[in-house]
Image (cartoon, coloured by chain):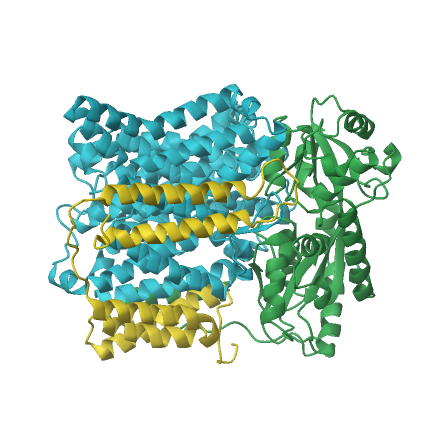
Chain colours: A green, B yellow, C cyan
């Protein structure tokens, strides 16, 4: 428990309470001093923006970075997380790019979801404008059904789609996002006409979608693996496939889409980035810090428990973002999700 | 409906707002993912707003014109201006400067004449809120032209 | 019984000095921060999450439980005393609570909401233990069509909110619904009603509505009526600090009804405390008889006791889908899910087997947190009432500053502050011309729920409205909602035809 924060609370309560009367109280001492890092960065508090509401994937990743930084004492400064929700991260990213140019103390977590939203929402701010620090992780999508579903495999699902393109209702995250994209890819793989397909039921997040899937309101659910892991483990949902190239180490019995006759690979990734135009020296220091986060026990434990793929890198990210943007745009346009 | 009825302006405002909602709703692009267009609900709301304006107009048609009490114009418009300025300058000037300026001015508008007390209260209050939010809750309040702590 | 054995084990965990201390800290922080306008339970927990890094999971979650229940307690204070609800779940409380405060019964209003919260929190925690599994399997049977119907039913609650003119209440509701639709549409990713202002993409949070319409509006109202306000002698306290006998007798049935409403609404994923509080207000007004019915809007204690019990019970209800299925049912439980994940835990039914110490320790500590809150808050009532002794110019300036900070903390957005200012002016004008404000808040909350669930339902039925409304649960709820909405008009028509004055009065009080 952080003692200086607690002192601050007591002092402020005393001052605010004293306002009506007129007694005085002296302010508490400010936060502790600087650490002894190789570069001069960081010399003050760091804020990590999670461009989404509390509880989702961006938020969890940002808080994990925060936890690793503070708990493993990688930096001695305060690290805060701020949530700016909206449009798959585009709203928060826009705020950061416009207001925090050159500021290496305002970091952000963005990902493939942000790239997709920037395309579907025709946003004027782009992930490519950010200064990438490190790609942190990748996560597979998972395709599930309620536990007593008649669809036992992806083949069953594809067969049903072949018969009637609207015969199966899908539940997943917001429209135009990665879950929607994967559903459309399945329809296409079944030879269905994506334009005539109107059976994707979007929910605000994995949680709300989960209730609809468990209750059998829809036939198939799609989300990031982490969102449905608990329900798969407890048997209220049955996993038909993962969308990664290979099965998960922790769940080898869930086959890939490829092994079931649908040539689709979709993985979600997230990266840590800074505003445009930060000093080159600070960027190097941030990359070194990111490596330490990745090597920490906090990080390793968490990513193992949540079946994240390790695709950590600090190099070649500008090119990576450019190619991802290109391929996501092409897929979404092809599927008719962007007009 | 008499234009001298105090609710007449309300009727006009509702009609304008209803038209705006219908326009804003109807111009929402529909990429055609679902069955019902995103325009549907706003348009329904806008139409219902027009209906509520008509209903209100009917209610005040021929009704006796009620007198409504005059307001204290001075303090009211001063408060609108002070509050507006405060909320508009909160980010550019930063929390500390804008609050230090706003608090004593607003107290004076609302009839306080104890300037010394107000200034002391302002400093203590702003310091308390600053400690609570910035130091304890670690919320990054805007600092404006002041250097970052 | 097995549950009691487990619960005893939970109390053994919760009663260790260390865990008691963390529950106490959580309760204290939750209350202190929950009092501030704009900062509700979800934001409080997410701000305080880093404090627990380095703690074990058990004490950390015991502290979160304390913060959650504590923040739910804190919300009503400013709403009752100064008519400035800090969060949407205590907007209805302001209607009758503030009237009570003006009559010098603010202490009683605070006491009934503190004891009501205790009763509701305890009942909800108890129901959580026994009904979690059964209720969860019922809740998932309800799909988008049923949610759509339930939200329409909730909308019918506006007819119980007082106002002098039916078309004005009707417009206030529509305004709220329209404000609730502003922003990115979840179903298509398109922008709606933003009129080219890119900062409105993320929508207008209901907190902005509560702070703008009520807090800023109240300050403008005070300024506009300054002379008469200064002339009027404000009564801080008349009679006993807490409740008198009659107030207590009127409160307890409302606590029980509010607890039931709140728990079940809270258990539905996506519904939440605000809707629970509005429905509870409608229930209280519907069950009141005679003179008491006409007191609603003028300081009926049931109008405080019911909604305050119900918004706390909904906190317990929201834990049902969290512990029963691992699904977050509300903004606050979404933060708890994040917290579970940071600790490497997967919330859900398996947690009862894997970490019984944690789950039962958490449940036991919720009982303790509730008791602590009562002990902490009842004596505070006297102190809070004294808040009204602060010179008004300082009090109102302070409210604006804390409101601005609260709004800024939400999304760190300068635009939000401007939205709050505009809503403040609108709120003042609406009050000046006798438009009720509470329906606007209900509208903001319900608009996306009604819209999204209707459109989801239509996708599920391939656009067939008949298939939609013939689902038994949907049909039943829709009929009840329609009856609620139409009843006042039918009564009025009937009264006009027959000239029956009694029926006419009934119709008037219902429409309000």
In front of the other: A243 or C464: C464
Q: Count all numbered tags in the image, as a single digit.
A: 0
Q: Is residue C373 visible?
A: no
Question: Looking at the picture, does residue B13 appear above or below residue C359?
Answer: below
Residue C202, picture quadrant: bottom right
- C217 vs B149, nearest the viewer: C217
Q: Is residue B45 above or below residue A65?
A: above
Instruction: Name the image quarter holding residue A25.
Output: bottom left
Q: Residue at x 16, y 34 (%)?
A: C246
Q: Is residue C462 left or right of residue C70?
A: right
Provide residue B111's location: percent of width, then percent of height: 19, 71
Which is more toward the observer, C53 or B124?
Answer: B124
Where is residue C313 drawn, in percent x and y?
A: 40, 36
Q: Is residue A236 left or right of residue B83?
A: right
Q: Is residue A277 above or below residue C187?
A: below
Q: Residue B15: x, y in percent?
A: 37, 50
For the residue pair B88 and C179, the one nearer the viewer reads as C179
The residue drawn where x is 36% and y is 50% is: B14
> Does any portion of residue B77 appear in the rendered image?
yes
Horizontal and vertical percent position of residue C323: 55, 35
């Amino acid at each position: 428990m952080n003692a200086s924060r607690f002192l601050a609370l007591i002092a402020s309560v005393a001052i605010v309470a004293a306002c009506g009367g007129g007694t005085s109280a002296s302010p508490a001492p400010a936060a502790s001093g600087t650490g002894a890092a190789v570069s001069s960065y960081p010399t003050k508090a760091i804020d990590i923006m999670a461009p989404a509401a509390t509880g989702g994937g961006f938020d969890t990743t940002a808080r994990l970075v925060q936890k690793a930084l503070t708990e493993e004492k990688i930096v001695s400064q305060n690290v805060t997380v701020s949530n700016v929700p909206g449009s798959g991260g585009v709203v928060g990213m826009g705020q950061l790019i416009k207001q925090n140019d050159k500021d290496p103390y305002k970091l952000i977590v963005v990902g493939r979801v942000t790239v997709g939203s920037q395309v579907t929402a025709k946003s004027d701010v782009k992930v490519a404008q950010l200064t990438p620090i490190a790609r942190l992780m990748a996560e597979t999508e998972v395709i599930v059904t309620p536990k007593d579903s008649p669809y036992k495999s992806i083949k069953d699902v594809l067969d049903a789609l072949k018969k009637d393109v609207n015969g199966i209702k899908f539940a997943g995250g917001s429209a135009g996002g990665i879950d929607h994209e994967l559903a459309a890819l399945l329809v296409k793989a079944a030879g269905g006409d994506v334009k005539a397909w109107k059976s994707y039921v979007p929910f605000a997040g994995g949680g709300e979608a989960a209730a609809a899937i468990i209750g059998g309101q829809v036939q198939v659910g799609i989300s990031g693996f982490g969102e449905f892991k608990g329900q798969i483990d407890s048997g209220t949902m049955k996993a038909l496939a993962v969308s990664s190239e290979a099965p998960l180490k922790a769940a080898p019995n869930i086959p890939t889409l490829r092994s079931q006759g649908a040539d689709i690979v979709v993985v979600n990734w997230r990266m840590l980035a800074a505003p445009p135009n930060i000093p080159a020296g600070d960027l190097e220091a941030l990359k070194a810090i990111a490596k330490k986060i990745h090597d920490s026990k906090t990080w390793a434990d968490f990513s193992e428990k949540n079946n994240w793929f390790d695709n950590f890198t600090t190099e070649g990210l500008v090119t990576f973002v450019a190619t991802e943007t290109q391929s996501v745009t092409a897929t979404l346009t092809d599927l008719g999700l962007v007009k | 409906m008499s234009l001298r009825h105090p609710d007449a302006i309300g009727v006009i405002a509702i009609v304008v707002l209803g038209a705006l909602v219908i326009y804003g709703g109807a111009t929402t692009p529909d990429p055609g993912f679902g069955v019902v267009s995103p325009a549907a609900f706003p348009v329904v709301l806008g139409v219902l707003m027009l209906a509520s304006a008509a209903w209100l107009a009917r209610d005040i048609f021929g009704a006796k014109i009620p007198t409504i009490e005059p307001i204290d114009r001075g303090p009211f418009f001063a408060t609108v201006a002070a509050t507006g300025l405060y909320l508009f300058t909160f980010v550019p000037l930063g929390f500390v400067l804008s609050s230090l300026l706003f608090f004593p001015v607003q107290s004076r508008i609302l009839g306080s004449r104890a300037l010394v007390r107000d200034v002391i209260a302002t400093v203590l209050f702003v310091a308390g809120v600053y400690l609570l939010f910035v130091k304890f809750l670690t919320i990054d309040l805007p600092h404006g032209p002041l250097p970052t702590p | 019984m097995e549950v009691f054995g487990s619960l005893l084990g939970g109390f053994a965990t919760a009663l260790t000095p260390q865990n008691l201390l963390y529950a106490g800290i959580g309760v204290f922080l939750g209350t202190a921060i929950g009092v501030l306008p704009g900062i509700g339970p979800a934001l409080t927990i997410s701000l305080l999450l880093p404090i627990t890094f380095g703690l074990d999971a058990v004490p950390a979650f015991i502290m979160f439980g304390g913060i959650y229940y504590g923040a739910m307690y804190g919300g009503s204070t400013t709403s009752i005393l100064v008519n400035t609800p800090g969060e949407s779940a205590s907007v209805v409380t302001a209607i009758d609570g503030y009237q009570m405060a003006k009559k010098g019964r603010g202490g009683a209003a605070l006491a009934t909401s503190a004891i009501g919260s205790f009763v509701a929190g305890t009942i909800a925690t108890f129901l959580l233990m026994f009904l979690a599994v059964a209720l969860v399997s019922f809740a998932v049977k309800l799909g988008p069509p049923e949610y759509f119907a339930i939200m329409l039913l909730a909308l019918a609650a506006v007819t119980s909110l007082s106002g002098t003119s039916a078309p004005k209440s009707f417009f206030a509701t529509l305004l709220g619904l329209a404000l609730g639709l502003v922003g990115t549409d979840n179903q298509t990713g398109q922008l709606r009603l933003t009129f080219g202002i890119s900062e409105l993409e993320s929508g207008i949070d209901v907190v902005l509505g509560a702070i703008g319409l009520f807090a800023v509006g109240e300050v403008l109202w005070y300024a506009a009526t300054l002379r008469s306000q200064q002339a009027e002698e404000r009564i801080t306290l008349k009679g006993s600090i807490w409740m008198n006998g009659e107030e207590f007798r009127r409160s307890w049935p409302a606590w029980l009804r509010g607890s039931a409403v709140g728990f079940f609404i809270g258990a539905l994923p996506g519904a939440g405390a605000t809707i629970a509080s509005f429905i509870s207000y409608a229930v209280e007004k519907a069950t009141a008889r005679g003179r008491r019915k006409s007191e609603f809007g003028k300081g009926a204690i049931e109008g405080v006791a019911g909604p305050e019990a119900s918004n706390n019970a909904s906190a317990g209800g929201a834990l049902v889908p969290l512990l029963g299925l691992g699904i977050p049912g509300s903004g606050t439980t979404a933060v708890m899910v994040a917290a579970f994940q940071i600790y490497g835990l997967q919330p859900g039914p398996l947690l009862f087997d894997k970490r019984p110490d944690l789950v039962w320790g958490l449940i036991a500590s919720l009982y303790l947190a509730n008791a602590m809150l009562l002990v902490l808050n009842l004596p505070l009532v006297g102190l809070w009432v004294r808040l009204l002794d602060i010179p008004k110019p300082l009090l109102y300036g302070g409210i604006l500053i804390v409101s601005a900070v609260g709004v800024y903390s939400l999304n760190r957005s300068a635009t939000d502050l401007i939205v709050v200012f505009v809503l403040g002016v609108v709120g003042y004008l609406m009050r000046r011309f006798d438009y009720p404000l509470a329906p606007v808040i209900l509208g903001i909350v319900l608009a996306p729920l009604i819209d999204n669930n209707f459109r989801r339902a239509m996708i599920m039925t391939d656009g067939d409205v008949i298939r939609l409304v013939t689902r038994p649960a949907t049909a039943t709820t829709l009929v009840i909602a329609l009856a609620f909405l139409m009843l006042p008009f039918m009564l009025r028509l009937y009264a006009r035809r027959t000239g029956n004055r009694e029926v006419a009065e009934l119709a008037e009080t219902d429409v309000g």
